[in-house]
Image: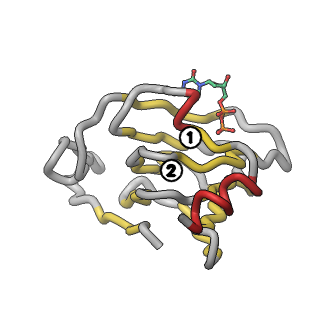
Amino acid sequence: MKIKMIDFKIMGDERGSLIALEEHHNVPFDVKRIYYIFGTKKDVRRGYHAHRDLKQLAICISGSCKFLLDDGKNKQHIELNSPTHGLLIEGLIWREMYDFSDNCVLMVLADNYYTANDYIRDYEQFLQESLK
Ligand code: TYD
């Protein structure tokens, strides 16, 4: 499955911690878009889509949440619970996000602008395209 965890270097001192994200350094793509999900209500599950051609790096900068990742053959559950690492998702992968903590802020960097056509929102369609 085309996913990878990236650990970020923490620049810490007696005041606390700082992480810097830089395209083509610790973010392995052009960053065209950043969005974040917050204030997620209890028991909400969201996502339910795959992208045809998009690279994304998801970082839980506050709190925690879980990802279900599915490439059509294998499924994997990953918890993000630290601002010190990010989940890189490339290729055709169905994703669902769930178990958001009250204080969760899930930030996502993407290598392209929002394009509705890039989304596959139907699971059967995703399975068909993932077999190609
Ligand atoms: P949606 O795709 O439903 O979020 P999720 O995949 O997390 O369930 O997005 C919610 C709304 O926000 C939907 O109307 C599309 C819009 N949106 C943008 O306009 N730009 C973006 O970058 C994203 C991710 C969503």
Percent x, y of residue 103: 64, 43
Q: Is the shortest distance between ligand 1 and the CB of mark 1 under 8 Å? A: no
Amino acid under label 2? Cys
Q: Residue furthest bottom?
A: 74
Question: As rendered, which of 76 and 36 lies closer to the eye?
Answer: 76
Q: Amino acid at mark 1?
A: Val
Regarding mark 1 in the picture, which secondary structure is present there? strand
| Residue 8 shown left or right of residue 36 in the figure | left
Please say if 60 is above or below 112.
below
The numbered disc on residue 105 is: 1
Nearest to the observer: residue 15 or residue 71: 71
Residue at the right extreme of this rendering: 43
Gap between marks 2 and 1 measured at Cα: 6 Å
Residues at circles 2 and 1 in contact by the CB criterion of under 8 Å: yes
Q: Which residue is mark 2?
A: 60
Pick the front one: 5 or 69:
69
